[in-house]
Image (cartoon, rainbow, N blue to C red):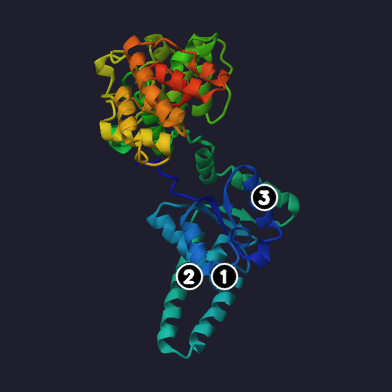
Amino acid sequence: MATTPASPFTYHVFLSFRGEDTRKAFTDHLFTALVQVGFQTFRDDDSIERGNYLNLELPEAIKQSRISIVVLSENYASSTWCLDELVTILECNKMRGNAVLPVFYDVEPSEVRKQMGSFAEAFLRHDNEVEAEGDRQRSLELAKRMKGRKAALRQVADLTGMVLKNQADGYVLSIVFAILETKTLNVVGDKVKRIVLNVAPHLIGLDLRARNINSWLRDGSNDVGIVAICGMGGIGKTTIAKYLYNLNCERFDSSNFLASIREVSEQPTGLLRLQRQLLSDVLKGKNENIFDVDQGIIRIQEALCRRKVLVVEDDVDRVDQLYAVLGMRDWLCPGSKIIITTRRKQLLKASEVHMVHEVSRMDNNQSLELFSWYAFGQDHPIEGYEDYSKRVVHYCDGLPLALQVLGSSLSGNTKETWENLGVEAKEAAIRDVAKLLALPELLQSIASINAITLLASRYAFCDTASISGFM
């Protein structure tokens, strides 16, 4: 069973600081500000559970943080703990790409780089401790570590950072706000603001189905590409698109997922709403005042030509919807990628599409596994229900939506209900009632689980994607 991978980071920010210098002043202000704007921030006195070994917990927290803010203060180097944190932070920057932002708190970068003043005094004490070590092997190990710590200070002093020379509260706060506006932290902030889309659980076989498109999204080329995911309603187009969006949205300057375009565009000012959403996402929440579709097209053109974007247009069924929301391919910045889900395979000209991915039905084994998760909470039928399950799976004919709806409806029901269901589902398939669009409202209004089951079976093959997210 495939699942959407979690983010490689647990924290947005790791704070490295000397507690006696800054904990109750600058660092406390900074920590509060970071949390208030939505950053998951690691600070050792708040984040480590009592009883955990700090020497194990802190390096892992550093690795799992997108950015480390290093507050270099007068007594920072007096703590070997802080120095070892810094060594790990810079190793992660080099090997894993984790960002680093130094803040020079009442010290000059040159003092840190050349290890003068309080830094020189701190290392004199450390060196004396190394010389006093009676065990020669241990002394050599400590000397090697001390050399690495000194090198780390020189390295961090050469990074672009913030200098805080005045400790007055008003000035401290202004520096805090300046830090929040730095390019490094804004990159992290953009990632925090990006919404991870909800994807249905039990994504059976999705890795394989999405593999080719995922490779295309990650090819690193500057080509502007459009991929169309095609297939009938309920086959899983939207689920695949959401899965790919979650995996790749952070690889682009901006990203946008426009859901249910066919449905939204039929509403008054629907296309205008879609244009506004696209602009808001691409421009990082900035609201654009557009009053008609033509004006929206011009604004979208201006926005898309300046940044590499990932845009997903879900359930497009007319060319005018596509044009009004996105426009022509020539607008897009190099490296941008567009994914379109549609039931109409021929919606786009072949020359405009890099790839047409036609979603196939699930095979019998995949269908039985998906159905079992919803019906029984496990990947196979419970004892005594094997034949009933295979019969229902046969009627669903590999449609994920039908398998989900029927599995959920039958969960916890008696064998008698299951027996009746088979007849109802077969009749539904023959009668082809695909135009019933009000099923969600009907389901909400019916209290009887048996009635729900009958409705679910009767209309398993209808256009009911809005109740599950499968398209």
Pick whichever, 59 or 259, lies toward us: 259
Residue at 47% over, 75% down = 146
> Where in the figure is residue 138, as x and y percent of width and height?
43, 84
Whether tag 1 and tag 2 are in contact, CB under 8 A, the answer is yes
Q: Mark 3 points at which residue?
A: 32
Q: What element carries label 2?
A: helix
**Residue 198 vertical position relative to residue 122 in the rendered view, above or below:** above
Q: What residue type is labelled 3?
A: Thr
Among the two numbered marks 1 and 2 on one chain, the one whose residue lies closer to the N terminus: 1
**Mark 3 or 2, nearer chain start:** 3
Q: Which residue is farthest front?
A: 416
Residue nearest the observer in this picture, 292 or 358: 358
Q: Nearer the viewer, residue 442 or 152?
A: 442
- Tell me the quarter of the image containing the N terminus: top left
Q: Name the residue under label 2.
A: 149
Q: Which mark is residue 221?
A: none
